Image (cartoon, helix red, strand yellow):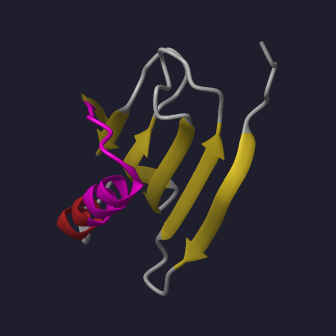
Amino acid sequence: MTNMKAKLVYYVKEYHTDGSIQEIKIWEVPTSKEKPHSLKYSFAYIVEEERVVGYDNAEGKGDHRHILGREYPYEFQGLDKLWNDFQSDIQRMKGRKP
């Protein structure tokens, strides 16, 4: 078995005129029970230094999302759906305070 480390395949951090920040990180990782899709990811929408919306699959937690400080399960169905779900949540949260 090869000991492959996580390989960063996508990273962007955008600063918006309203002061919010959107940061996306995607790594390629070995397929495992915890990461059957071979991806590790972190999507964050930050307002006033607080994460308002986040999607990730942190070690030991599996796929999940964060909305206004609360954590919810998330069923990963591909990067396109993840991106669209993330953007939809951002639109719903715009203007709300963390």
Numbered circles on residues, count: 0
Residue farthest toward the left in the current orientation of the protein: 92
Question: Could you say where residue 20 lies in the image, as x and y percent from the top left?
Answer: 46, 71
Q: Is residue 54 left or right of residue 2?
A: left
Question: Could you say where residue 64 lies in the image, as x and y percent from the top left?
Answer: 34, 33
The residue at 52%/56% (across/down) is 49
Question: Could you say where residue 94 lies in the image, as x and y percent from the top left?
Answer: 26, 70
Q: Is residue 42 above or below residue 48?
A: above
Q: Quadrant of residue 65?
A: top left
Q: Is residue 82 magenta?
A: yes
Residue 82 visible in the snapshot: yes
Give the quarter of the figure containing the N terminus. top right
The residue at 48%/14% (across/down) is 33
The magenta span reads: 73-87
Q: Nearer the viewer, residue 16 or 13?
A: 13
Q: Is residue 44 above or below residue 13?
A: above
Q: Is residue 9 left or right of residue 34?
A: right
The residue at 23%/70% (across/down) is 91
Residue farthest toward the front in the current orientation of the protein: 1
Question: Could you say where residue 2 lies in the image, as x and y percent from the top left?
Answer: 81, 19
